[in-house]
Image (cartoon, coloured by chain):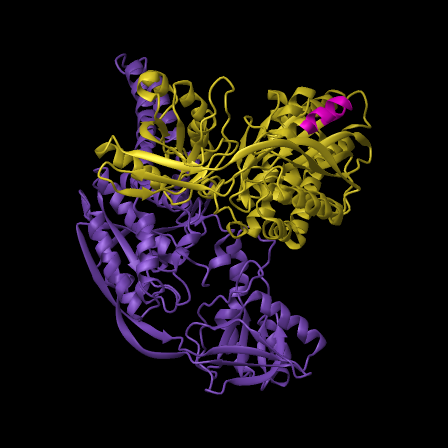
Chain colours: A yellow, B purple
Amino acid sequence: MLFSEDTKQDLIKFVQNNVGMKRIIPTVLIIILFYLPSQAQQNDSMMLNRIFAEIMVNGKAYDNLRSLCKQVGPRLSGSDNAEKAIQLTASMLKIAGADTVYLQPCKVPHWVRGSQESANMLLSDGTRQSMRLCALGNSSGTPSAGISGKVIEVSSLEELSVLGEKGIKGKIVFFNKPMNPLYLRTFKAYGECGVMRWGGPSEAARFGAIGAVVRSLASNDDDYPHTGVTEYNDSFPKIPAIAISTNDANRLSASLKTDPSLQINFITSCKMLADVLSYNVIGELRGSSQPKEFITVGGHLDSWDLAEGAHDDGTGCVQSIEILRSLKAIGYRPKHTLRVVMFMNEENGGRGGEAYYNFAVVNKEKHLFAIESDAGGFSPRGFATEMSASQYQQFLKWKPLFENYDMTQFSNDGDGSDIYHLKKIGALVAELRPDSQRYFDVHHAVTDTFESVSKRELHLGAFVMGALIWLVDQYGL
Amino acid sequence: MLFSEDTKQDLIKFVQNNVGMKRIIPTVLIIILFYLPSQAQQNDSMMLNRIFAEIMVNGKAYDNLRSLCKQVGPRLSGSDNAEKAIQLTASMLKIAGADTVYLQPCKVPHWVRGSQESANMLLSDGTRQSMRLCALGNSSGTPSAGISGKVIEVSSLEELSVLGEKGIKGKIVFFNKPMNPLYLRTFKAYGECGVMRWGGPSEAARFGAIGAVVRSLASNDDDYPHTGVTEYNDSFPKIPAIAISTNDANRLSASLKTDPSLQINFITSCKMLADVLSYNVIGELRGSSQPKEFITVGGHLDSWDLAEGAHDDGTGCVQSIEILRSLKAIGYRPKHTLRVVMFMNEENGGRGGEAYYNFAVVNKEKHLFAIESDAGGFSPRGFATEMSASQYQQFLKWKPLFENYDMTQFSNDGDGSDIYHLKKIGALVAELRPDSQRYFDVHHAVTDTFESVSKRELHLGAFVMGALIWLVDQYGL
């Protein structure tokens, strides 16, 4: 670790060239040259093993996750449960051994689902079939009688402009693009289909649609509606928008083929209230030599209201706390200040991430590195980073240390939705990349429960992030 | 694929050396030399992609697993459900497109749990605490009143001989060694602790123990007893043997520290009946050019009686069927005969594997390759093989093809409990190595349900085995 192979070769040449002149140097120096790096590598490996052992044997992340999911549960920004989660995780950080624990204020949107949600397919022959639905986050509700209309099915945003007002006005637009099963890593498929949930309702409203129905963003066909945020464009009417389960999307699509005049109706009673004051939860281990330089590790504390928010993103929160706990437990005092941050409002506003960044700017903080876990608590497979090519080359030298723990996927193409702002003030950023196969089975749905998390997978994820933080703290990038 | 790098270099030298003599060869030949291999590699890659697409888009393994788990469920050898599973999977093989489907007879042990199972800790102060238990597979039941006795706790077989008759006679031996959380891959910990379940009861009986209690082989502390086979040594009394949940094992161990005179009692009503006739289920795709040479892929059809046997080993069965289905669906006719085998009785006898081998010997069958999936239906991480060093080097040349699908763990140290016999008649063998972190949460316990399986993970496992089979069929080893 201390010397690159090139440097080592240069030094050996230097020794060899100077052997004639100075007889003192050679043997001892060569021994030192070879000994030091290998000793350093061994030390790195041993230190990683210590962190690994501490987390795999004494780790508290799984128990903390149980508390967060079962004592608090769903914790959408602005809700009473979000407040409970703030208090609970602040207490976890204290127990974990943080030097200081504090709340960082941020105003967050306060969207509520309300008690009314129903949807039906109304076939031309008079039959009626209910559909499993949920309002999209931040969407407007329907009038109390609901909305009804004919349906136009599309599988991309582009189709909307082809159809135009003529094809869309007065209708309900049905966005029905299944996540592509051929993408090995599921986030690619999520990104491709996600644009329709994020931007689809407003794009439909641009052409006069009265409502929007989105196929749930789920990897497989099932009966669960998966919610998620939609983003209205203020230039167009804020039409009601829902997600239906993938099975219902298949049924609706099949019915439309034989009965294009069928109607659907749906009722939602969700609404956006005034912003409320909320908080990021922050715990620190003060740096021994560079306390004014920060390494951040975090996940987001808010979750959707439909489930326990275990993988999204309870796991990121408890893993981050676990890193602080385990470093403290093995007696490691970081050189730089380690900040564990549970960001508020990632799901429907991103205000916590903004507040953290704004605070850093105002206080002229120096941020060395930030890493986020927000892709589920599954077996860690690698890291994605955003840094310069030369920094990334340095980063890759650590890859063998992680390969010892079956982490092999490294790429320089990732940041994280709560930490990406920090790049503007010079931070290098990274995100944990766990195995992605199961994530969109549970994402934003009632199935995202504590029971769907594996203790060993969760703790392994905490370990690899802790190991990376230790390396960055020791050697920089 | 067609030429190794060494061969290519030799050929290039040959061309260069002969340039002076024969002016016709050089340019054209060099082009061919470089073009052919890269074309072959591209073709391999394209073929793997075709199999991948077929399975990820049209795969039936997940639906078949649902049927096996929900229509049949637990299917211990000799049970009515095992018979149902034979009929169901034979039908699946026909639907998948096998040329021939047949049943291969084997006599299997017929162990039944019976209806009585209870266990209690009886503390010296008179209090009584129930424990969650299950009889170990193949174990003898207790007298109808149960057995009671003081407890001696050990964490290894070796401790038994140190304690001797003096320390053990008349007591119940409690084998309490947690699976080591520091082993990254969980099968290592299972092997280390498993010896106590397999051999512990008889070793305890050797020194006069009246019963044996084994800590469940589970990665984490939970409330579920995990069963599994024990193997009596005929030289000693067949004492009743049970597993208790890891949480109960922790409680029992803690209580023994403060109350070493506590007793436990337990009642089981399990018994071994006479062997019954059962079957391996076999489906074939006949080879186009070497139909008398066999490639075998399989899992085991029997499961423990406590759960649906999803990961153990419904997944191996439906993956194997899927390989046949997908190769047929894309119009690939193997050169060698592909045999999909659902082995009976892996769990408590291994008779199906033996029968398959014996049949091969009697019929002088030539077995080229056999691969087994019996480590859960989780994300595939690699293959373990057993072959010569030179064959393994050849095998490793395919590694990059699998790395495209995030499979990186290759090692020459694995076979499979139903196929290892085939090594004796020259077969090269391999096993799928899925991510192992979750396996021992569900293994042999009521938690091994269909719901614990991810469709994408299951189908990816089928794909990588299908891809390997295609490569072996094309190129041999």
Query: Does residue B85 appear in this view?
Result: yes
Question: Residue reaching furthest front?
Answer: A145
The reply, left or right, for residue A428 in relation to residue B388 is right
- In the depicted view, which residue is nearer to us: B30 or B372? B372
Q: Main secondary structure of the magenta part?
A: helix
**Which of the image's four quarters has the C terminus of chain A?**
top right
Query: Does residue B51 appear in this view?
Result: no
- In the depicted view, which residue is nearer to us: B30 or A183? A183
Q: Position of residue A117 (x, y in %)?
A: 44, 41
User: Residue drawn at (20%, 41%), measured in percent from left and top?
Assistant: B333
Displayed quadrant of residue B462: top left
Location of residue B417 with respect to B15 vertically, above or below: below
- Is A358 a magenta residue? yes
Q: Position of residue B43 (x, y in %)?
A: 30, 29
- In the depicted view, which residue is nearer to us: B78 or B81? B81
Which residue range is magenta in the image? Answer: A355-367
- Is B471 a magenta residue? no
**Which of the image's four quarters has the N terminus of chain A?**
top right
- In the depicted view, which residue is nearer to us: B214 or A133? A133
User: Residue drawn at (23%, 36%), measured in percent from left and top?
Assistant: A124
Q: Position of residue B243 (x, y in %)?
A: 51, 71
Displayed quadrant of residue A100: top right
User: Residue drawn at (23%, 37%), measured in percent from left and top?
Assistant: B330
Displayed quadrant of residue B446: bottom left
The reply, left or right, for residue B32 in relation to residue A72 is left
User: Residue drawn at (70%, 45%), measured in percent from left and top?
Assistant: A87
